[in-house]
Structure formats: structure tokens, C-alpha cells
Image (cartoon, coloured by chain):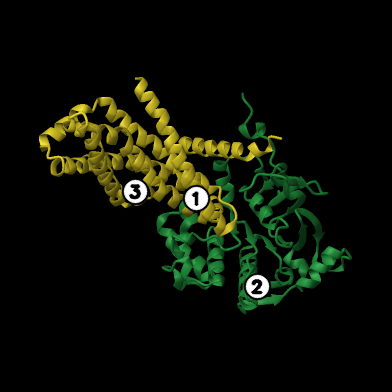
Chain colours: A yellow, B green
Amino acid sequence: MLDFLKSPVIAVQDFFLLAGRTFRNLWRRPHYPADIFMQMDIIGVGSLPIVSMIGFFTGAVLGMQMAKALMQYGAVGQTGQLVAITMVRELGPVLTAVVVAGRNAAGIASELGSMKVTEQIDAMRALGTDPVQKLVKPRLVATCTVLPLLTIIADFVGLFGGFLIAYFVLHLTGAQYWNNAWQSLEYKDITFGLAKPFSFAFIVALVGCYYGLSTTGGTQGVGRATTQAVVASMILIFVTNFFITRIYVSL
Amino acid sequence: MPPPVASILPAPDLGRNPAGEPEPAPVLRFERVTVSFGELRALDEVSFRMNAGESRVIFGAAGSGKTVLLKTALGLLKPASGRVWVFGRDITGLPEQELFPIRARIGVLFQEGGLFDSLTVEENVAYPLENQPSLRCPPEQVRRRVEEALRFVELEHTLEKFPSELSGGMRRRVGIARAVVTEPRLVLYDSPTAGLDPITAYTIIALIVKERDLRGAATVLATHRYQDGHWLANFRYDPGAGGLRPADPALTRARFLVLREGRLEFEGTQAELEASRDPYLSKFVKREE
């Protein structure tokens, strides 16, 4: 009767087994530093243009929308505060993670999926390499390193986008905008603003690797794995964000 | 005084011949091995053994379990029941890290070659030498051994090429070079001639026979082509002429296994296989011949 639950339960179990094996291997040699740096380049430097663009336009749109709402209370001068809080606490981490999930969870799943269906993963194991160490660990370490950095950049570029609107459209002074923005932030904003991308990095890398390594069924299977990796990682990012925010507001 | 360590360790898996002298453990031994994927039994109670220097030809249609059998021998797939011994060691429950030293002594050619498409031919062939923790090949020897292995398959001019730049037959030959570069005692070939034209298929089988006869490695050849097994059982490599010459099947020590939907339907010599009246076996033999 409950057979329909079997495959999702097994999938969750396999995902946590993969995560567990990856964590156990984090400090075990060999570490493949060249692969880690290559993944940092692909995931970090490769995502920089799109993350900056999205951060900039989100900040600018926030500036316009918030100013419109604040105008009703005669509080347009508070625009910086609202842009800063929204960008640093929520939109910066979530949008950056979603963009990286779209680019890299998909990229990881399709690359590992192609390797799986062409027996390269089996060959790797047969020739003395653990795919978890050689493929999963470098992607996890690289994503955990670059996603918080990308988020910091997205936050700053977003604030700058909000500043341009405040300066040229709302005619606030630079000092007014930046002081207001700066003073509205607390230390825990920085802590949580970085804890979020760090958690999302685990989701993006491990979900991408999990779907890639469990690919079956030829090229069609690779396409399916890629789609599932993007959908699953995005849903998990939003759900995780909800719980982290819940912890944040209760502190 | 404590007993010496050797005396408290379990005795290695040695058989005894009628004269009472210990025989070397079989290179590969399956004992009622079952491998399942959900409800499907990909291997169903398969048992066989092979000794050093022997050859096994595994016939079977697509989906009969040939690839699963080879991957189980490598420890890439875990049996649901039964036991697998490689070089006398029970590998059934071994963790991945402990399987690496055993795999380092096994060469394998995957069905489509299994070459890493992001690495050059040279890097592909060097991969086991550089990554098998138990081999510890000195870095200055890697290039020489890679060149030797590629010369063996007559592809020494392709060092810098990527697998995507090679033809299907050349990719299999690079796969063979990668399988034998570590000088393994056991080599597994998974459908090495599938999808190749007859001339290229002959080249591949000739290389497999050459590897077997020059180095004496135990050879397992999974194939659906009857002709491949015929060559392996009835020909030997002639170093003088540089090609294959007919040989007494007793010399090649080749035995044939036939798999059907995961079950081992037949094990015996080529003559026994050809004499079989079983409809599946005889149909298979005649059709492929």
C-alpha cells in the first residue's frame, strides 16, 4: 500500500549516505587541490557576472519600490535601511544561491551524469580513485568557499543599485543613504547573511552530485538528472531559508 | 612467549590436490553469487572458478548479466548473496578503500572504453599508475610505461589527443593500453568488439590474445560474438611472425560460460558447447557463427 513512498525514502537515504561519506572524506587524503581551484573558477568566477547583474537590478528595484511605499509616511530617507535589510538578510543569499543552483547544480549533475552513463565513474573506481573524494569533495569545498563570497558581492552591488536610485531618482545624498543603510545592520545580520549561503552551498553541491551520480538511462537520464537537480536544490534552498530565518527572528 | 603472528592468522584460501600439496588459490571464484536491482535478479546463483593463466569466455545476449558479472568481480557491485574471491581473498564485504589494492592487480576494459573524456590519451593511460595508491609508480617512470603500453596497442602517436578525436576502435585500443599498463594478473574485457567492423574487431581480439600470451595474465572476455571466443580458444600469439597462429585448445586453457537472464546456463569447453543440444545454447552458437 505504501509502495509509492519507497523510492523517495530510498532517495533521501542515498542522499544522506552520500553526504555522510563526503563529510568523512573531507580531511582524508588525497585532497586534489587542483580540482578544488578549478571548481572555484567554474562556480565562483563563472557566476560573478550574472550574480552581479541580478544583485544590481534587485537592489535598484527594491530602492524604487521601497521609496514608493515610504513616501506615504514621508519617510523616503529610510530607503537605505530597507534596501540593506532586505538585501543582506534575504534576497542577497537566496537569489545568489538560486542563480548558482541554476548554473552549477545543473552543471554538476550533467557532468557527473554523463560520466556515470559512459562508465567513467566505474572506471575511476576500478583505477584506484574514490569518486566521492575526486568529484564530490572538490565541488563541495569550492561551492562552500565561493557562495558566501558571491553573496557578499551581490549584497554590495545590490546596495549600490539602491544607492543609484536614491541619489538620482529620490535625490537623497550619498551620506544619507549609506549611513542609514549601515546603521540598520546588526552583527547577527552578517552572521546569518553568511550562514545562509554556507548552508545553501551544501545543498547546491550535494544535490547536484547526488543526482549526477545516481543517473541511469543514457542521455535522456542525464537530462532528467539535470532538471531534478535544479528543481530539488531550489526547493531545498527556499525551505532551508525559511527555517534559518525562523531561528534568526527568534534570537 | 606469544605465538608468531603468522600462526594465529587464518590460513590463506589454498586448495589441496590429490597428492596433498597446496594449490594456488584461484584467481577468480564466484560461489552462488546473486546480484539484484530491486526485483530484477541480474545475476542468479552464479558459481565458477578460474586459475592463473586460464581464459574464460562469457557469452550471453544483451542484458544477460555479462557486465554485472565483471563489475561484481571488481567489487563495483555488491552481491545480495553469495561470495566472490579474487586472488584468494574474499572481497564480498570489503569497504571501498580496501578494494583498491585488489583492483590495482586487475585490468579492465569497459564496454565503451570508459575513457575519461576530459583527459588526453596519455593522461588516461597514466591514470592507474598515478592514482592506484598501492602501485606507487615513480613519476619519472610513468611516461615510459605509458609509451610502452601505447606501443603495445600501436597507438604511440596519439599521446596528446583527446578520446573524442579517436575512432571507436582506437578508443578500445587506448582502453586496452590503460587496462594493461599496470601489468595486472587478471584482465577483464567487457564486450570489446561490440559495434566494431569485423577487421577492427579482429585487431582488438588479436591484442587481447597477445596480452594473454606474452604476459600470461588470466583473461575474462565477455562478448555476444561467438567468433571472439573461437579466436581466444583456438589461437595463440606468435611473437616471431607478430600475429596469431592456430593452437591446441588445451594450450589456451579457455573455457566457455553462457549466461541467460542472469543464470549460468553452461560451463565447459568449446567442443562441449558446440555439441550441446540445448535449444538456447545451440541457437546462440549457430546464430553467432
Give the left or right position of residue B208, taking residue A107 as reference: right
Determine the CA span between mark 2 and mark 3: 47 Å
Please identify the quarter of the rendering in which residue B285 is found. bottom right
> In the image, are marks 2 and 3 on the same chain?
no
Quadrant of the drawing holding the N terminus of chain B: top right
Q: Residues within 10 Å of mark 1 (few under 14, many from 20)?
A: some
Q: Tell me if residue B168 comes above or below residue B18 in the rendering.
A: below
Q: What amino acid does circle 3 point to?
A: Phe
Q: Quadrant of the C terminus of chain B?
A: bottom right
Crowd class of label 3 (few under 14; some 14 to 19; many from 20; radius 10 Å) = some
Q: Nearer the viewer, residue B106 or B66?
A: B66
The chain identifier of the residue carrying mark 2 reads B
State the residue lying farthest toward the top. Answer: A251
Question: Residue at (41%, 42%) from the top-left corner?
Answer: A140
Mark 2 to mark 1 CA distance (whole Å): 51 Å
Please give the label number shown on residue A37.
3
Amino acid at pointer 2: Tyr
Q: Secondary structure at mark 1?
A: helix
On screen, residue B281 above or below A123: below
Q: Position of residue A11 (x, y in %)?
A: 58, 40
Are circles 1 and 3 on residues that touch, CB within 8 Å?
no
Can you tell which mark lies on residue A227? 1
Where disc 3 sits, the SS reads helix
Query: Residue at horizontal 84%, vertical 69%?
Result: B274
Residue plotted at (24% across, 32% down): A82
Circles 2 and 3 in contact, beta carbons < 8 Å: no
Mark 2 or mark 1, whichever is nearer to me: 1
Residue type at mark 1 is Thr
Which residue is denoted by mark 2 in the rendering? B237
Nearer to us in this view, B288 or A179: A179
